[in-house]
Amino acid sequence: MHGWHGRVLRIDLSRGSIQEEDFSEEDARKYIGGRGLAIKYLMEDMDPKVDPLSPENLLIMATGPLTATPAPTGNRYMVVTKSPLTGVLSNSNSGGDFPTFLKRSGFDLLIFEGRAEQPVYLYLDDGRAELRDASHLWGMDTHETDDTIRAETAEDVRIACIGPGGENLALIAAIINDKHRAAARSGVGAVMGSKNLKAVAARGEREPSLHDEKAMRAVVRESVKQLAQDIRKGSTMRIYGTSYVPDVTHEAGVFPTYNFQYGQFRGTHKINGPTLKEHFLIRHKGCYACPLACSRLTEVRAEEWGEKYAGAGEGPEYETIGSLGGACGVDNMAAVTKANYVCNELGLDTISTGVTIATAMELYTKGILKEEEIGRPLPFGDADGMIEMIRLAARREGFGEQIAAGSWRLAQEYGHPEISVTAKKLEFPSYDARGLKGMGLLYATSNIGASHMAGDTAYTELFGVGKKIDGLTYEGKGALVKHFQDLFTIIDAAGLCVFVAIRYTLDTEAGYIPTRLAEMVNQATGSVYTPDSLLLAAERVYTLERLFLTKAGITRADDTIAPRMAESMPSGPIQGETFDLDRVLDEYYVERGWDEDGIPTQQRLETLGISHYA
Amino acid sequence: MQITVRLLASYRQYLPEDHDDQAGFTYEVAPRARVAEVLDTLPVPPDDPYTFFVNGRHAEREKMLEPGDVLSVFPAVGGG
């Protein structure tokens, strides 16, 4: 087999046993890999109705056929499980070094089941797998955990682990790899914690073989030539990475401000790329073998910003700036950066954490939540209160118990569900849907809830990469969202980074066609995908994921969006705009071949070759 | 007539150090000027794929500008 190793590791944590098994090339092609193969295993081996924090939930870590190949940014992995935050699917994505090292350890997928009696970690050493005691690691933050495991295994391991957030089953807990990268969304860290699994450490030299390495390297050279445009001195990527985005979302009036009450923040210019570069940037840093190097190593110096904000790490990226900055009304970049570091160290999702604290701030500001209940005042803009809430949430101490449960439960608890800006209980990323109707439809229909990573139509509706589509119109958004969801499914399943794959493996001018992406997958695996057949495979995966939701009880009634999106935007360039889901949902279901209740039809399932799962 | 121009992200490097990014700059253009005519006069690398908004929204290059419009330009990079 090429591209894939064809090997799955099943780790039964209750029994402490590890078993290897193969998967067939036919299945690999049918589901592409990564996220695609993961949902196949989830559907076959697990009841979609299980309690996400029970031993019966499966936690899958999956690489794709392009992970650890020469494909630019072939360094991603997916965490797939049932989410304790949302009750639907998790497929959370991360880069860095760990995904490449995981694949090189000799396995495509890890499937964890059960619950270890004592804390353990999995050590993957070049084709061998071993469960090790992690009692001494329990309670450590992600940085201490990383350093300790490295010291007791090998210098060339890379580690994904949970911090106190995951250990304490905070529903907004992330899995952190390489200290600074996060498979962040929908509580995957809590699932890991519920299994008493502290970490996975991987090393090895088992690069996947390639079907046609020469052809692949030629395509890679072409891509890198195009990438040179971004890498050159003075480019936005080189200077700012994603931290340039607040200026753009502010300009369009879709920057999350005071828990999405507004779309423009008075302090945007204090928490944007130029501020980060001027005061905090140390140097650029890339994920494994990435020529783009869009991440930034930063430092908040104590002598300049005070001891309480001092620290060093990576970030913040755009989403973190939006959630812990604009949504919380915090215009202090030292504080936002520090809050980012604390989330990474304690193992929390910066998006869900920021938006949940913003929810608490709104409840407090409106007098619904009292100072005595929080243990302190918590107005918008209170940077120190925000950082204290993060620390409390990771340990579920004091009011942190409420923050750890996420925005939806917090707003329910205090009788104001309308204040929670979520879809399927997952907190919005930093794009207001009132100005980007495609994003609104994406949030409402995504298999994981409100995530930009599920099919970010802002590329065309906002950023204008390739073909530009007006964010404010409803026409054609059903087809657009379906296409983007399927595209992102391919990228996730293949093991690429969306940020790079969108622009260098798709024909964006022609309407985002995965031409080069199909070539690369073929060269790696020996498949014969056309752009259309690859999109069809992605639709198969996406629809199978939806079937998982259907079996968990999800229908049209759950494809909803935060009530705030029906409120008229009070100011800015999109003043007066709302997002009306009813105008686009039916069209979307028709595009998907689902019935009017959002259930995949037998006919479509048969076309996709997955009717046996119904 | 006067419009406001804002150069965002890396394009602000073509402006003076002390330029007010948030306010942008006032730009005197011919009455009924089209977006394309104004874009051609801005210090943006011509071979760079860029995106522009008129009042925060995608517009056609042939769109006719009105007094007080805000034209903002940034590299077409993508999100995060």
Image (cartoon, rainbow, N blue to C red):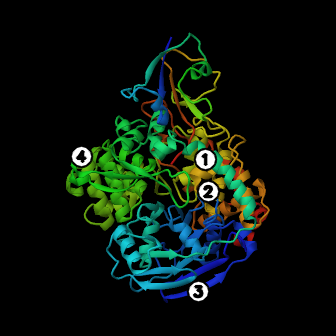
Q: Amino acid at mark 4?
A: Glu
Where A45 sits versus A420, above or below? below
Q: Which residue is mark 4?
A: A304
Earlier along the polypeptide chain: callout 2 or callout 3? 3
From the image, which quarter does the N terminus of chain A lie in? bottom right
Can residue A540 be seen at all in this image of the molecule?
A: yes
Which element carries disc 3, helix, strand or loop?
strand
Spatial separation of the CA atoms under disc 3 and disc 1: 41 Å
Residues tagged by mark 4 and mark 2 found on one chain of the structure: yes
Disc sitting over residue A19 in the figure: 3
N-terminal label among 3 and 4 = 3
A302 or A396: nearer the viewer: A302
Q: Which mark is residue A112?
A: none
Distance (Cα) linking label 4 and label 2: 38 Å
Q: CA distance from mark 2 to mark 3?
A: 32 Å
Dot 1 or dot 2: first in sequence order is: 2
Mark 1 and mark 4 lie on one chain; the one further toward the N terminus is 1
Residue B6 percent coordinates (x, y): 47, 27
- Nearer the observer, disc 3 or disc 4? 4
In the image, what residue type sits under mark 2? Pro
Q: Are marks 1 and 2 in contact (CB under 8 Å)?
A: yes
Q: Chain of mark 1?
A: A
